Each structure stands twice: as structure tokens, then as C-alpha cells.
Amino acid sequence: MEAGAGAGAIGVAEFCALLKAVARRPPRLSRDLEPDLIGIELKQRILEALIADPPAPVDFEAGLLERADALDLSTGAARGVCSDILAEWRMAHAAPAFLPWLRAEAARPPDAGRRRRREEREGEPSWRPRPDRGFGAPPTNSD
């Protein structure tokens, strides 16, 4: 069956393993990453529970919530993480390009280069001056 076509496009255990591999990296931001790291750890725990005991694809949502509930996590945090996982599950079945992207991202090593834009341009400033577009300039008289 073609990727992205129907509920049989990918199995629950394979999907969760791919998602677990992709969700191992925190974002690279200049801020406190502790909440992100807690969310990643919660997501990893829920995905591990799904991999260990995968529900049937048609029962994914109920199975996801049952696995998260069995982990005795904070209800709000668990539901938030579960809603993200459910959205990604639905996207894997609805968007044909998502599954190949997910597989490619999961195959990347954890320390593979995820650079900020400014790091991509060695020696250039993180900002670029905008070209002068003449806004605010007095009109020219071309008569």
C-alpha cells in the first residue's frame, strides 16, 4: 500500500519508533530548554509504552491514551503530548510527504548538523541589510 494511503500505511510500532528517533533532539533556541526537555522525556516514555504494547491501528487514539494513563503521568502534560502524537499519526496517514520525511529524519544521527541560519553563512552577520526601496523619500518630479 502506498505511503499515506489509509490506516495500513505504517504500523503503530514502526511509526512510534520513527517518532521516538526524531523526537530525541531539543530545539536550538536561546532560552530555557527545561520545559522542552521535560516534554521530550514524556513523549519518549509514551512512545516506548506504545512500542512495547502497540494497539491496533484503528484503535490508536484509545490505545495511546490508555498507555499514557498507565504511566501515571500528570494528566495535563500527558494529554498534551498525546495530542501531538495523535496529530503526527494522522498526518502520517493523510500527507503523503510526511512519512518519507519522518523516515529520513529518523535515519539522521542525533548530532547531525541542525544549524541556525546565521551559522550557515560563515563570516556573515545574522542579519542582512534590506535594500533601500525608497520608502519615505520625497516624490521625484519627472514632468
Image (cartoon, rainbow, N blue to C red):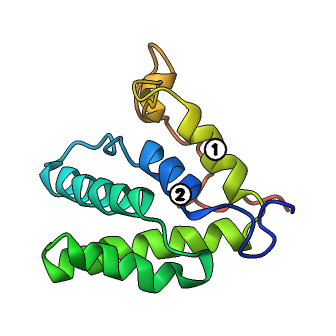
Camera-nearest residue between 141 and 129: 129
Q: CA distance from mark 1 to mark 2?
A: 13 Å
Give the labeled residue for mark 1.
103
Tell me which corner region of the image, top left, top right, bottom left or bottom right, holds residue 11.
bottom right
Is residue 7 toward the left or the right of residue 114 in the image? right
**Residue shown at the point (68%, 55%) measured from the top left:** 99
Q: Dot 2, how many residues are within 10 Å of its Cα: few (below 14), some (14-19), or many (20+)?
A: many
Quadrant assignment for the N terminus: bottom right
Foreground: disc 1 or disc 2: 2
Q: Is residue 130 visible?
A: yes
Q: Give SS at disc 2.
A: helix
Camera-nearest residue between 24 and 135: 24
The amino acid on which the numbered mark 2 sits, given as a three-letter code, is Ala
The amino acid on which the numbered mark 1 sits, given as a three-letter code, is Arg
Could you say where residue 2 lies in the image, as x and y percent from the top left? 86, 61
Mark 1 and mark 2 lie on one chain; the one further toward the N terminus is 2
Is residue 10 toward the left or the right of residue 89 in the image? right
Camera-nearest residue between 98 and 131: 98
Could you say where residue 40 lies in the image, as x and y percent from the top left? 28, 53
Q: Give SS at disc 1.
A: helix
Residue 13's tag is 2
Could you say where residue 20 lies in the image, as x and y percent from the top left? 42, 49
**Residue shown at the point (18%, 47%) measured from the top left:** 31
Q: Is residue 137 visible?
A: no
Is residue 86 toward the left or the right of residue 34 in the image? right
